Image: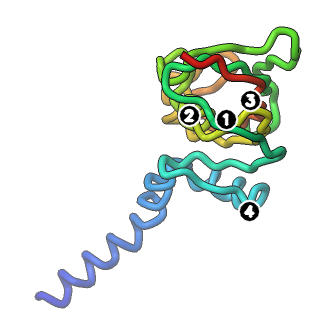
Amino acid sequence: MRFHTLVLVLGAILLLQPSLHAQRERFSIDDLNFLDKNYPNAQKTSTGIRYVVQKDGEGEGPNQGDTVNVLYEGRLLDGTLFDKATDKTHPFSFRLGRKQVIAGWDQIVKLMKPGEKLLAIIPSELAYGSRGQLPRIPRDSALIFTIELISINRL
């Protein structure tokens, strides 16, 4: 009887392994396959954000409460553009760590240096989650942003 129980438990673990992996990664299996295919060298934060530095920056990064000025484009994984701020004379500004933007942005911009440009792939739960931002952003959508940190206004 013990052998049969062990076989059942091991079988259940093997069946659940893909979903446990996706949960730990914070991306669905389909999204992980897309990321592995298109961004195999992306770095990963402890919270599951993947990113690729496209241009290095210099100096000290922002701190909680600093106002940052960024240029960005936001896309769905299928490439659909849903938002952008690309005019250097009118960058998008927000206070870091004050929940003025999605959690993924607070986390990734905190890691950037002035002048740095990166591509960030943010899991749904650090973006708009199960509610989405309809009609532009469907529910449970991972998002891709190119973000350039233009400047920091320190407290």
Q: Of the residues under marks 2 and 4, which one precedes in the sequence?
A: 4
Distance of mark 2 from mark 1, alpha carbons? 10 Å
Type of amino acid under label 3: Leu
Mark 2 or mark 3, which has the lower sequence index? 2
The percent coordinates of residue 97 (x first, y second) are 48, 24
The residue pinned by badge 1 equals: 143
Residue 80 relative to residue 61: left or right: right
Badge 2 crowding class, 10 Å Cα cut-off, few under 14, some 14 to 19, many 20 or more, is many
Where is residue 148, by image quadrant?
A: top right
Q: Could you tell which of marks 1 and 3 lies nearer the N-terminus? A: 1
Give me the C-alpha separation between circle 2 and circle 3.
15 Å
According to the picture, the residue beneath numbered tag 4 turns out to be 40
- Find numbered disc 1 in the image and state the secondary structure of the residue it sits on: strand
- Indicate the position of residue 150 as horizontal and vertical percent values: 78, 25
First in residue order: circle 4 vs circle 1: 4
Q: Which residue is mark 3?
A: 149
110 or 82: nearer the viewer: 110
